[in-house]
Image: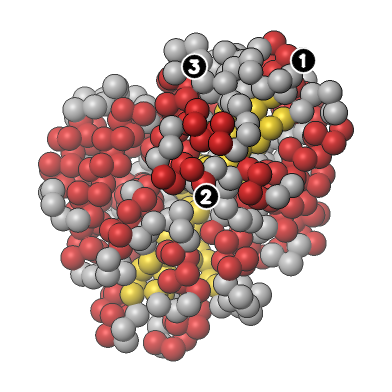
Amino acid sequence: MALSRRTLLALAAGVPVSAALTACGGSSGPGRSGGGATYWYLNGQPQETARAGAVDAFNKAHPDGQIKDTTFQNDAYKTKIKTAIGSGQAPTIIWGWGGGTLRTYAEAGQVEDLTSFFEEHSDVKEGLFPSSFGAATVDGKIYAMPCETVQPIILYYNRKVFDRVGVEPPESWDDIMALVPKFNAKGIAPFSLGGQSRWTSMMWLEFLFDRIGGSEVFQAVIEGEKDAWSHPDAIKALTKAQELVEADGFIKGFSSITADSNADQALLYTGKAAMMLHGAWSYGIQQTDGGDFVSGGGLGHMTFPPVEGGKGDPSNTVGNPAQYLSISSKASAEQKKIAKDFFATGVLQEAEVKQWIDNGSVPIRLGTEKLLAASESADFLRFTYDIASKAEVFVQSWDQALSPTAAETLLDNIVKLFQLSISPEQFARNLNAVIGK
């Protein structure tokens, strides 16, 4: 299936959702798909090929119950899907990250309760990582189908750059700060960062909060504890993030670099930056776009190092335990049936699992160890598998764990924090104001 059939270029120009869908010949409103279901998800390679392949395989096997898919860039999707759901114009199948946003949808009655589906299809549930269901569950009920891959956040580095400068990968936060002037002296940015996308900077805070204060610091925010963002360890973490900015730890102009463009990835594999904190999905992007960077042994990877005196378990990680598919409550009965058939027989089937592994990702389907071991990316896949399976705590990405209101406030203030336009104390006050909202 051609990429042009799926991608809505009109979105980049700010065309309204309904107009964009009409322009590409599709219809995503509930009950208007001419007998088929609709499905929105993220574009971008290599992940898009796996998602599209699963839809194509399902459609081939179900000629009387088709799925029409449409893709979006990451940042555009987050806005468009919320608008579509809020206006009752959601696609049948809603791709997402679970967590706080899913809770908002569930509490508003905008997505189907899938608890009985998983009771009827216990084999489907039992075939997936048990940890993947936490972010799919709201008040004991399951509102989403876990899918795709486990995606911890990883510290990548360019081995050739390290060899050229004559330094070793950091084993502590002090090591990170000591490396910064050494790379800058050679005209190499210590860290790549697509700061315009906001959530990329958030990953730094997620790890600093955990390594300094342990998982309890952010858990207090989730539980709605008053003034949780002002915890002394939170202020310390925010301060360290600004110290790294002030030391020129990031590429100059990082606030203008977007993650959707993969410009941050290119800075690493072209040697313009020495390191990059990013998701496990980055491996596949660098493998696809970086020439022989990955195959030639140029890419190094490690977990985020401990912070001296910190309380966090170094095995703790952050990121996405899985991705998630929900069904719009506004879809027709026929569309809901097609979606459930897709969940039961079309998600994480053999060909899709192989595609994710070939992309350098670890699918959330149990029993893939032999396939992982046989992959050309076996070392990285085992590394990712071990992080996800051995973590004492796997914290979901903050902007997904929080409610949409709190998440938007968080992302806006992260930009200000990294631009040094607010202090750690101001950041904490601004976030405390939306705890529980």
Residue at which label 2 appears? 152
Determine whether, in the image, residue 422 is placed left or right of residue 47: left
- Quadrant of the frame with the C terminus: top left
Q: CA distance from mark 2 to mark 3?
A: 33 Å
Q: Position of residue 133 (x, y in %)?
A: 60, 29
Give me the residue at 20% from left, 49% from top: 416
Determine whether, in the image, residue 147 is placed left or right of residue 179: right
Q: What amino acid type should be assigned to the residue bearing mark 3? A: Gly
Residue at which label 1 appears? 120
Q: In this rendering, is residue 268 above or below 284?
A: below
Taking depth in this image into account, of 297 and 209 the one nearest to the observer is 297
Query: Which image quadrant for residue 384?
Result: bottom right
Query: Which image quadrant for residue 267?
Result: bottom left
Asked which secondary structure carries label 2, the reply is strand
Q: Earlier in the sequence, mark 1 or mark 2?
A: 1
Q: CA distance from mark 1 to mark 2?
A: 31 Å
Residue at which label 3 appears? 88
Residue contact between numbered discs 1 and 2, judged by CB atoms under 8 Å:
no
Q: What amino acid type should be assigned to the residue bearing mark 2? A: Pro
Asked which secondary structure carries label 3, the reply is loop
Q: Position of residue 197 (x, y in %)?
A: 36, 50
